[in-house]
Amino acid sequence: MQEASTTKRLSAEDRRASIIEAAKHLFARSGFHGVSIDQIVKEVGVSPAILYRHFKSKEELYEAVLHEFSCTRESYVETVVADDIGFEQVLRGMTRVFVTSIINQPDLLKMEMHSQLEGHVASQEFFLNRWKSFTDYIEYNLTELINQKKIQPMNVEAASLIYQGMIREVLLLKCLRSTNRLIEMTIDEIVDEIINLFLKIITPA
């Protein structure tokens, strides 16, 4: 009863935020179709009437959760604007920022996977807000290095996609899957190996 009275004292804005926060974990774990309204109201500790006062439907709540997740951005500013560092150092820095963000909030990756599987438009928002600046930086710098004849000619879009896919696979392996693969290596060690392999592939001997 005390929990109900505490919930009652929340402002409309705080109550809405608490519903989104609780729904985040449920949707991240089970996707849109795997979560019921009953589960959400039980998790939040409110009645269905209160939930529907803030969200007209489960679909609207899911949209709000996806929007909040997809608008989360990493800040690469300090990494990119640092003086006297080259492509390799910035690539390592940006990758570590992104990987750390996902490790600290694995629900972000889960929601991205669910939105893609369910064909939701938010999957494009996830790419634009979370991956695009990453891949754009790689494509731009690979193009510059090719023009300077420092690396071999290649399809820079394909190269950045390959790199993104490798990093994504590491995150899936370490954050979502229960497996013994590479269990003896930390995520930082695996990421470093991938960066070394990527640089070796694009750089002529």
Image (cartoon, grey):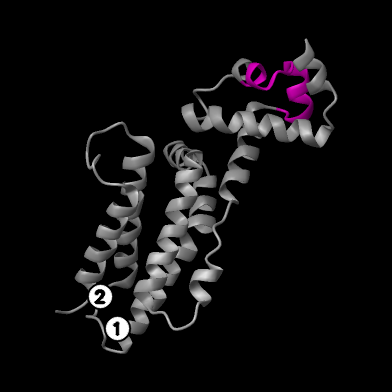
Whole-angstrom CA distance, mark 2 to mark 1, is: 8 Å
Q: Which residues are magenta?
A: 40-56
Q: In the image, what residue type sits under mark 1?
A: Ile
How many marks do you count on the picture? 2
Q: Please, what is the dominant secondary structure of the magenta stretch?
A: helix
Give the x, y percent position of residue 178: 31, 31
Is 49 on the left or on the right of 102, as rendered?
right
Quarter of the rendering containing residue 182: top left
Which residue is painted at 22% across and 39% down in the image? 181
The residue where tag 1 is placed is 146
Which residue is painted at 64% across and 27% down in the image? 58
Give the x, y percent position of residue 34: 49, 23
Q: Is residue 5 above or below residue 167?
A: above
| CB contact under 8 Å: marks 2 and 1 | yes
Quarter of the rendering containing residue 52: top right
| On-image quarter of the C terminus | bottom left
Is 137 on the left or on the right of 157, as rendered?
right
